Every structure is written in C-alpha cells, then in structure tokens.
Image (spheres, rainbow, N blue to C red):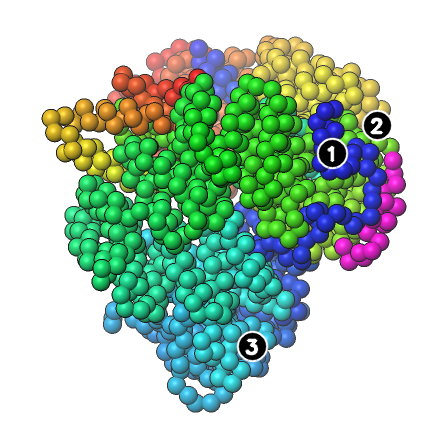
Amino acid sequence: MRLSLAIVAILGALPATLPLPARAGSPASPADASPEPGLRLPVRITAGSANQFLGVPSPDGQRLYFASDQRSTTEIHLQDLDGGGPRLLFDLQADATWPRPSPDGRRLLYLSFRDDATGDACLYDLESGDHRCVTGPGTADVQAMWFPDGRFGVVQRDSLHGDFRLVRYGVDGGAGTVVVDRSLSTPAVSPDGSMLAYLPLARAQAGVGVTFDPRTASSLEFQRLDRKEPARPFSPDLPGATGFPAFSADGKWLYFTQYRNDTSSDGSIDASDHGVVFRVSLDADSGMPSTGAVPQQLTSAAWSCQYPSPGRDFLFVTCSHEGSLDVYRLPLDGSVPPGWGLDRLDARLRHARDPWERLMLMATALRKDPDPASRHRRLRSLAFAEADAGDLLSANHHARSLRKAARPGSETSEADALLELVEHRRDEQRFLRGAMPEARFLSLARSRADRMRPLAESAGTPVPLARLALSEILDSAGDEAAARRAFDTVDPVSLEDPDLVRLAARRAVDLFRADGSRGRLRELYASLSRHPALEAPDRLAFAGRQVEDLLRGLPAARRIPVLEEARKGLDPGSDLAFRLDLDRRLQGLAGGDPEEVRKAVLELYRENKDPDRRRVLALATARRAAAADAEPVTYDFVNTWASGVRADSTDRETAKALYRAVVLDRAWGDFADGNFPDARGRFHEVTLQTGALEAHEGFVQARLAEGKDDLDTLYAKRFQGDPDDPTPAFVRAFRIALDLPVGGDPEKALASLRQAEEWARPAARARPNDWEIHLLRGFLAHARHLRTGDAQAAVTASSAYTLALDLARDSPRARAAVLLESGLLHASLGNAAASLRLLDERVRLPFATPAAELSLRVARARCLFLSDRDAEAADEADRALALVESRPAMAAHLPPALDRAALLALVAGRAARAADLYARLRPHVEATASTPVGALNLARLDLSSGAAMLADARPAQAIDALARARQYFHGRKALPPAPPAFPGRAASPRLFDPVDLEILATSLEARALQDAGRLQDAARRVDEEAELRRQRLERLDLDEDLLGLAEAGWRRAELAWRAKDPDGFRKRAAAALARAREYGRRTGTPFPNAETRVLQGRAAAILLLGLPAQPPDATLGRDLARAHAFLSAHRTPAREADRFRLGVLASLWQLGNPEGIDAPRHAPGGKP
Amino acid sequence: MIRVAFHRFAWAGMALALAATGCITIPSVVVVDRKTALESMVAGEYPAQEAASTRDGMSPGPTALSRGTLLAVGAESRAGFDGLTEPWTVFTTDADVVDELLGQRCLGEGRDGALIERRDTCLGRVDSAVVATLLQRQNRAREQVWRWLGQASPGRGEAEVRAAWRATRLAEVPCGAPVQAADGRWEGKACD
C-alpha cells in the first residue's frame, strides 16, 4: 500500500481506479512522441525454418517474389505484402531462382535448372501459369533482368570457361542481341532504359573462366544504352567492395551493397562478407551518381544485408540477422529518419550502445554536416570509432581521407599514426586467426614501432595518438616495459580531445588491468570522471568504472567502508561523489530493508535534476534492485524516471521500453492473481504511456474479467480524434479472436474470423514490427485452418508465428503463447519434429491454466509417439492423465486422456499399465456406446484392451474382448463416418475399413487362443484371417496381403507343429514360403522377414527337433546361407538377431552335411 | 526350446505386432507410417474434447504469467530488462569481456595463472570463436606481463612471479567466478 501511494504521488493517478480518458497526455508523457523518435529497424517479411532470399516486389508493390530453399531445392515463392503467408509459386521439381517480375506485372522471369544444370532463362505467365524457357542448353544463364520496354536481359556464357555477357531477348523468343560484351555481374537498368549499371568481372587467371575464378572490379560501371559512349566507372567513396546495383523506381537513386570488411576471413572482401546497403543520388543529366554525392548508409553493419531491391514504397533487402536469412523491408531512405538533423543525431549518439548503430549515426552526421571544420572533426571521430569497433577497413579508409586533408606537421603525423595503428590491429587480427605466423607479426610490429617513434614528436610538438599507438604496438609485441614508458609520456588528464582521452583511458585499462596496477587505474578513473573535455555520460561512465573497480571481487562486509573511504574529500557536487553516494545507498539492498533503500535513493534522485545523472540512478537502481529481488524498488524507480523523461529526449525510447517492461510485468502479475482492477489500471497506464498493443490486450482481458463489456464505447471515445490510429481496429480483432467459439454455427465462426482478419489488417500495415500483430494473425489463420482444413491458412499461421517468435525474443509471455500455438499447429499437421522443437522449449515455461498445459502434453505425447520415442510418449501421456485427474473441472477430458495413456503405455511395452488404464476407460466408453461412434469406440477398446491383456500374458481375458471386437467388425459394410475435428470442417476419410479391423482382431484373437492352449480354435481363427486376406487380395491385389498371407501361413504351420502334425507343418511352411517369396519378387524385397522366418523355422525343426529332411528341403542349406549373406551385406539393427540366427543355422546345416551345403540333408532321424 | 524361440520370434511385442499388422491393410493407395496406422485403427475418437484441448492451448495474446512463476523456472519476466538497464560504457575492453565471462562461469582462472574456457559451467550463450580469440590474446598478454615482471624482479623465479601476480589478480576476480585450486578442483570465488 505504501508503494502504491508512492506511485500515485509520482504519476498523479491511482492506476487501479483510472477511468479510460481521452488520449491526450501530459507533456511528460512518452506518448507525445515526434513522428520518428527512433531508428527504423528493418521489418522482417519472410519467415520459415529455411533461407528466404532475393526478394523482389511486384510492380504494384502488393506482393513479394522470393527464393526459398524450404524444400531443399531452391524454389520461387510469392507472398502477399498485406499480411498473407508465403506460397510456392510453381513446382518445377528442380531448382528455380532469381525471380524478376516484368514491368507490366504479367510475367515472371526466372532461372530454371530443371532441363539444364547450367541454367535457363524462363518466363512464367502469372495469369495462365504457362512456363516457357527462352534459352537452352547452349548457354549457361546466371542472372536475369527486365528492360523497361518489356524485353529482358540475361547474363550468360557459352562454354565452361567462357566469359559472361549481357544478352537481350524479346518475350516472344528468338535470337538474343548482345548488349554488353564483357564479363559482368548483376546488371541493372534505369527506369527510362537509358543507363545500365553493373559490376565488371575479369579473369583472375587467363585460362580459367570467370565462373570459377573471377576478379571483381573495384568499381561499378555505367553504360549508356541510348547512345554510343564508353562505359564510365563509379567508385563510391567508401571502403571495401561494391556490388548489386539497383535503380530506384523514380530513377533518382542508385542502391548498392558495400562489403566493408573481410568478415568471412577468407582473405578477400567480396559478397561472402557482411554487406551494408547504401544509396547515392543520380544526376538527372548524366544518369551517373552526382559529382560529390556522398553515399547514404541505409542499413547498420550489425545486419548483413544485400540484394537491394527498391520498390514503389519500400526498399527490400535480404539480411542475415540473428541466425536467419530472410527478406526485410525498409523505408526507401533507410534506417536513420531523414528528418533527423545534426542535433538529433548527436543527441542519439551520446547514448547509443550498439557500436554499429553509432557508426551509422556518425556517418550520417558526417554526410549532413555542412561545416568543413566540423566535418573534419567528425571524420576523425568516425575513424577512431571504427578502429575501436574493429571496423578496420573503414578506419583505414577514413584515416587515409584524414591524411589527405591533413596540414603538414602534427596533423599529418597523427593521421599517419592512426593508419599505423589500424594496420597493426589488422595484422593482429590476422595473427590471432592463424593467417599470419607470430614471427612475421612480431617483425611487422617492431618495424611499425620504429616508424612510430619519430611520429611521436612532430617538430617538437608531442603527438599523443602516436605515443598511445606506439604503446599499444609495443605491448602487442611483448615489450611491456617500453609500452609502459610510451604510455607514461601521455597525460590523459591534460588531453583536450575526447577521442584521445577515450583512447588513452582504454590503453590505461589494458596496461593496468594486466599488471594489477589498480591504484593507478582508479586514480585515472577519478580524474576522467571530472574531465572537462568529456561530456556528462562519459564522465559518469568513468565514475561508474571507478565504483565497479572498487567493489569488484570485494567481500560484502567491506563494500560500504570502501565506498565511504573513497567518498572522503570529494567535491559533493562531482559526478564521482554522486556515483559513490548512489552505490553506498544501493548496498542496503543486500540484506537491508528495501523500503529504506527506496527512500534513500529517491532522496538522491530529487537532489539531482540533471537528466544524465537521473538516467544513471534509475537504471542502476532498477538493475541492482532486480538482482536483489527487491521488485517494488525496481518498479518504483522505473516509474519515477520514465514519467520524468521529456518527450523530445533521446532517453525516451529506453524509458518507454523499460516502463513497458516493468509495469506490464506487474500488471500481468495482478491479472494472474485475479486482481483485475489493479491489472486493468496498470495496463491502461501502459497504453497511455507507450501505446503498446500488449497493454491493450491486457486491458481488454482485465476489463472483461471484471464483467464489464463497455470496451467498444471506451475505445470509440478514446480514439475519436484519431481515426487513422489502427489500435481500435486491432482491439476489435483481438476481441473477436478471444470470443471465437469452439463449437456452434461454423458459418458464424468463419464470418467472425473474416471480420477479425479485416480488422487486424490496418495494424499489420502500421506496426509490422510488433509481435502482437503477428501472434494475432497467426492465431486467426490457425483458427481458420482448424475450421476449414485450408492448407494455405496453416502456412500463413506458421509464417506469422515465426515472425512473432522472432520479434518476441525477450518476452517470455509472448513466447509462451507463440511456442505453444505454433507447436500445436505443427502437431496437427503431422510435423512431429518441428512441433517437438517448439513444445520442448515451451514446456520449460510455466502455464497460466491447466487446460493450456493439457493441450501441450497431449500434443507432445503424440509427437513423441510419432517420433518413436515411445517411453517418453507414455510418460508424457501419464502426465496429461494425472493433470486431468487432479482437476475435477477437466473431467470431460478423462476418457481421451485414459485412452491415449493406455495406447502409449501399450506401445512402450507397459502392457499391465495399459490393460489397467483400458479397464478404467471401459465404463466411460460403455456409457456412450449407444451412438455409432460410441459403439466403434467400444469395439476399438475391446481390440486394444485385448491386445494389452494378451501382451500382459492374460490370454483368457484377452480372448473375450478380441472376440467382441471381431464380431463388431465382421460383415460390417462401413465404419461410421469420422466426426470432423471442428464443427463445420469436412470429415477426414477413414484410412481403414471394417475388414482391416476384423483381420487385426482375428489375428490377435488367434494369438490369444494359441497362448491359452486352444490350438484348434487358434488354427480356425488363423484360417479365417487368411481367408479374409485371400478375398481382399482377389479384390484389391495388395502386396501387403501377400505378406499377411505368408505370415498367417507360418503361424498356421507353427500350430500344426504344436499339434504334432509334421506333414501339415511342411505343407503350410512351404505355402508360407511361396507367399513370402512372391511378395519379395513383386516388391523387389530380397529376403523379407516372412521368408527368413520360415527358413529359420524349417531349419530349426530339422536340425534341432528331429524333423526328417525331405526332398523339398534340398535347397534349405543354400537358402539359409544366401539369406545370411544378404543380411550380412545389408546390416540393420532391426535384423541383427535374424542375421545371427541364420548364421548359426547355416553353420549347423553345413556341419551336419559334409557333402556340402547344397546337398540334401540326411536327418539323423527322430520324430517331431 | 525352439518353441520358445519361435514364440518370441513370431509374437514378440504385441504393440509391434499390432502396428505391423495394421500397417499392411490399407485398402487404397494411402501411405501412412505404422504409428499413424496404429493410432487410426485402435485409438478412440473424442473430437469434442480434442477440439477443446487445442482451443485451450491457443490464445490471440500473451500468456498471463506472473513474475513469480516465471522466475521459478529461471525466466526473466520483464521483456528486455537486462539490456535496457545495462550501464552505458565509454568502451569495452578485453578485461571487461573477461570479467563478464568469468561472471557467467564461461571462463575460469586456472591454477597456472591462465584463463581457461569452462563450457560445462557456462551460463548463457557465447560465441566460441570470439572466446577462443579472446583467450589467445589474453593469455598471450599474461605471459608477456609475467616475463616483464620477472625481468623487473631479478632473483625471483618464474613460478614465484606468476604466483604473486595471480594472488593480486584473484583479489579482483568477480565474486562467484570459477577459480582453480592447487589440486585442480574448481570453486566459485567466495565473497561473503
């Protein structure tokens, strides 16, 4: 209660009792954002377990064509960009790739590898579905593109080692015309058809074709198509290699991929390395990149993106990110909002944590800065930051630019020193990756150090960068004393340049952490925490490092005294004093009263109005309180800070995300505890502060749980001033989804689904990076699939769930929902392995309801069963059953749970348990036996429980049950229709008919009779089974019946043997063998089980039981040997015992038959 | 004896017999695996309960789980909390990364003064290639420092220098980090 009041004081409202107000918030509300408060992350469009790549939009921007290797071969898929799932465009049963829709949208150009392993350029008519290949086996076609006039170009070569060229074809075929007669790659044509851009290729070796050993040019080439002019090169002022040019739809921009580093460590920079997408403006007259135009970075180097394909509204790229290769989309002007000016960029830079984001922002600011002096400073900072981040090729490139612009003297020396440092780090990378021997590395480092020494002084002016670089190089080379001496010539405190201060500090950390000079390090941190050249975040960070170093590894009891000692004598207003005060207060979280800590830290918060300090205080407190499990303190400080962050602050994104995380956490806790008013209030607050859709979903559910269904009115009122906001439509779709009935009128359910899908669409367009949208879309498509069996709906659901899972990496509640639903979807489709991957991850999270847990356990048990993990399946079914039995409210699920647990126990070899479970199931089944399906269930219960009792060595009891089952199926024309899985869905056809089940029941009954010693009855049943099979064989001519007859024949032979009828045994064994061999011949199966079984039985009877050999047994020895040889040559674990027995019998046969294995066996006599 | 062998051979495992028999009696050209066949033949049909069970597992929104239940299974309940509250740093040095990996029990301080990878105790995911490069660089740096310290302290043997350095080093190793004792056992550094 006390904390609640504190929150009230902070937020000015009581969450639990908040009515839903109009959308307007306070000025401090993060909801009052400027239109683009953050960077625009690429939006993932495709999803799946495989790779999706080469995405190209249709000319109207409504659909995406892309290649995918989902089915092992590369195939072309199509996806509606308005929220649909992917579908295979056509099935060639071969590789097809490089999709390119024609300018009129009627055809798709692609490369087919069906009839030509080297590739044909083909056209697919999107209306008629006709395919036509324009090129043939005479050429190898590797890339294709459209010209705006409706003709298309193909990059091809004639022979294995031939050069590529670009050839133009008409859609009606005919001979092509050579457009560019030189080796090239990825040609692109401008929208008016006047200019072609491509990447030139050359042979690296004269005799080897470009396909196998190409050397890519360092620049793109532009070739005019409307007049005869030599091609002109274009090299962007960027490090690395350039590729994949593409013109924008309006012809004003050229997009391309830049490979800036050898990320693949293969010694060259090419398309195997991480790509970054850029664009550069084109001059209207020349059609070439404008003179002096600086390329604009569109994607962060943290994402490896390539294949830019600018559409009408969006740029599509293929990115490798977080382990998946997929097609993403971005605004045409990239990740950094074009409206961000230098102030905004600089403010964002001050807090950016991701080094690659920092580099992108720095490059953007450099491009935008009009002031030459400021640009120079930015270029220098960029080069330093690139060197720091390990983006060494870029650092080298920018250091060279600095060198070119440097004035003689210390500026030149510094640029040279930076270049040497960067090159030294590249050498070190090579050495550590094993690409350079240590001796060579040391030699290079020493030479470099020799060159650095003169640079350290430039005409009497010290060059601190050279001294720091020298220290680093000497350190790497193992000259520790010299490295320290070089460092000691630099006084970090007296440096005025922040980049140098940071570099010096870093050097100090490397040296002093290595040799344990903690005193010197702390002294330095303390100085840097008040360094005038540094900005507040840097100073606070050094203060934080100081505290961290003071406390690292220290026993808990010594921490407070150490902090107090360090605090003595400090300026109370200093950043270091603030940081020490904060940590001194936070020490109370270790065993103290959290409320006291909260008060003490809040006091410090009030005393410090500076936003940088407040950020540090809030984040450190939240983190430490969370680690100490002082949840109310975390909650309080996140609330406090978030509500105080200005709307235009660069902290706003972090504040919003943290507020959302912490308050939603509390709200779901309230909801789970049944405290709906408080939950609703907190959800409502989050909707106001962040607009999070998850909060709306929670609010809706809490409100409904309170018994109040006034949501339509509330939302209409709240959003009445903002008709374009998709939130109310999303909420409406969510509500429909919540209320979808399991049963009831199927048409009504489908109408509701259609309505919900329609409502969800605007939000899907507006907020594509919100997992809530994809979860809802997945749910709706999944529900559609369940109700209609529509396979495309299942694909859409799977794709949406994958996207939701990708976006909800950090949200366990979202993951819990998506993992379960996606797992259930795959289970229902029979994708047991895919389902288990998802359900196994889901089962590690808790469940909100027993019903949800039951659904998982039932599906998981079935998937384990289908994956031949029988014991685990039986265990999981037992857990499902235990869950049902522990919850009276789940009594309706008891019969299926018993049925499933019994079946899986039987399969797992737990016959007694299965029989017991079937016995418990019987009264439930008998109670419903008056309906056709109920009667069938009873017959199946007889069948399966009979099997269980038989396996449990209770044949007498099994006989009755199996006889009842046999009688139920006997003479029955058809089984009752299978009930549909969902009301309204078409029933699945039954896989088996009554005869199948009668054969099974008869066969099992025969075994039970045999086990019970009723051999004559058993023989009668075996004959009945054989007769049923014979009839069916005549009717359907199934191979399987031949095999069944062979097996039945052998069982009959065995019964004859037991009835002391050797002639009958011979006769029936011979018949069984003939059937088995007939089956083997028809199916091409050498030595099927049935055959080896008869061979072994006959041989054992002769060799071990005294059955006299007769002429028909003349070949038995040879057959045994051949069967043994075959199984030895084709060994499988399942037939290893067979192989062993055959080997023993063949040897015995030979031992008893000195005339040779092929000779007729003369039995020693004896009787059976 | 032979009868027993036959019996086992012919009738081994009722479930397998069931499945094998069921698998071969499909009247049309429909290929199903034997488990599906077995299920289709002998499992009871409960469509209403099965539909309800599937529906119970589905929700258009997140699962309402309290922080307590999530923490009980070791899951952080607040989306992205760790990343959001991570302190802003001016730079990240090798020493910072080593501290983090020691804290995650992915590295340990070996008894000879070298850093050692500890895959079996590692909490969280690490890029093994990055760790390998880091270890190589750090251990190489340590060797160089020991050599230098030895040169700066004539008369002290290499082992003595190393031991002295290690004692200093262990004082600043994060609490809980794996530290190898002289007998080779690994223990978490105690700070309480």
Please tell me which residue is depicted at 48% across the width and 13% down the height of the picture: B3
> Where is residue B69, by image quadrant?
top right
Query: Between tags 3 and 2, which lies in front?
Result: 3
Secondary structure of residue under mark 2: loop
Residue A315 image point, x, y percent: 57, 64
Crowd band around label 3 with a 10 angstrom C-alpha radius: few (<14), some (14–19), many (20+): some
Query: According to the image, label 2 marks what residue?
Result: A931
Above or below residue A555? Residue A398 is below
Please tell me which residue is depicted at 64% across the width and 17% down the height of the picture: A914
The type of residue carrying mark 2 is: Thr
Q: How many marks?
A: 3
Residue A769 image point, x, y percent: 63, 51
Query: According to the image, label 1 marks what residue?
Result: A9
Q: Is residue A100 magenta?
A: no
Tags 3 and 2 touching, CB below 8 Å: no
Query: Between tags 1 and 3, which lies in front?
Result: 1
Report the Cα–Cα distance between label 3 and label 2: 71 Å
Secondary structure of residue under mark 1: helix
Query: According to the image, label 3 marks what residue?
Result: A251
Q: Assign the N terminus of chain A to one quadrant of the image.
A: top right
Chain ID for label 2?
A
The type of residue carrying mark 1 is: Ala
**Which residues make up the magenta segment?**
A708-725
Above or below residue B23? Residue B9 is above
The verdict on a common chain for dots 1 and 2 is: yes
Can see residue A671? yes
**Which comes sooner in the sequence, label 3 or label 2?**
3
Q: Assign the C terminus of chain A to one quadrant of the image.
A: top left
Report the Cα–Cα distance between label 1 and label 3: 57 Å
In the image, taking residue A576 as reference, residue A880 lies left or right, namely right
Please tell me which residue is depicted at 40% across the width and 23% down the height of the picture: A554
